[in-house]
Image (cartoon, rainbow, N blue to C red):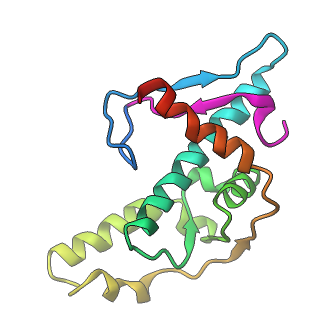
């Protein structure tokens, strides 16, 4: 399916929305459905909706004054090349991919490092940066093919819940 999923948009608020809307009562929604659409459109729209939600979260961090100098991708979902490309394109930023074996346990590793900070093994979270693995690949964003779909995504929440 091409970017924009043929006009289908998915809001991924299956358990409410926390960033940037802080609305636990929000629920997921599909819009733009028609008889000409396939399961492929719905799947693509679901992936785009998750990526759009991540983009909004990233924008909220930066608007709040928290710089995000780089993005790293890890975990099981990060292994799929189509998802890597879609995410880099939607975020408009390079994604640094962690090596496969490390990426698979990145969440547990991060939790262990934060526990080390909390227990005093490390003085600050910055002290753990030297233990972070170097990315083995970088996915560069492509063109801005998702801008119209992202604009559509951003219009839907206020119309449904505003």
Quadrant in the picture for residue 142: bottom right
Q: Determine whether 54 is above or below 43 in the image.
A: below
- Residue at 37% x, 43% y: name it: 21
Q: Nearer the viewer, residue 47 or 109?
A: 47
State which region is magenta: 1-15
Q: Position of residue 115 (x, y in %)?
A: 23, 70
Q: Report the label total.
A: 0
Residue 27 makes an appearance in the image: no
Magenta span has 147?
Answer: no
Q: Is residue 81 left or right of residue 25?
A: right
In what quadrant of the picture does the C terminus appear? Answer: top left
Q: Is residue 57 left or right of residue 98?
A: left
- Residue at 71% x, 41% y: name it: 149
Q: Nearer the viewer, residue 32 or 121?
A: 32
Q: Determine whether 93 is above or below 47 in the image.
A: below
Q: Position of residue 17 (x, y in %)?
A: 39, 38
Q: Determine whether 50 is above or below 84 in the image.
A: above
Q: Position of residue 95 (x, y in %)?
A: 65, 68
Q: Main secondary structure of the magenta part?
A: loop
- Residue at 38% x, 61% y: name it: 108
Magenta span has 9?
Answer: yes
Quadrant in the picture for residue 112: bottom left
Residue at the limit of the structure toward the top, as seen here: 35
Q: Determine whether 43 is above or below 138 in the image.
A: above
């Amino acid at each position: 399916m091409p970017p924009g999923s043929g006009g289908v948009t998915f809001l991924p608020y299956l358990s409410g929305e926390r960033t940037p809307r802080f609305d636990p009562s929000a629920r997921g929604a599909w819009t733009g459905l028609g008889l000409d659409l396939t399961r492929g459109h719905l799947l693509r729209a679901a992936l785009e909706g998750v990526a759009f939600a991540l983009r909004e979260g990233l924008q909220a961090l930066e608007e709040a004054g928290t710089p995000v100098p780089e993005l790293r991708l890890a975990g099981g979902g990060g292994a799929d090349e189509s998802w890597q490309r879609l995410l880099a394109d939607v975020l408009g930023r390079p994604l640094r991919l962690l090596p496969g074996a490390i990426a698979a346990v990145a969440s547990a590793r991060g939790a262990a490092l934060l526990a080390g900070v909390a227990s005093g093994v490390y003085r600050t979270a910055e002290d753990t940066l030297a233990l972070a693995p170097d990315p083995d690949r970088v996915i560069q964003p492509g063109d801005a093919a998702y801008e119209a779909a992202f604009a559509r995504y951003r219009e839907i929440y206020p119309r449904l819940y505003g």
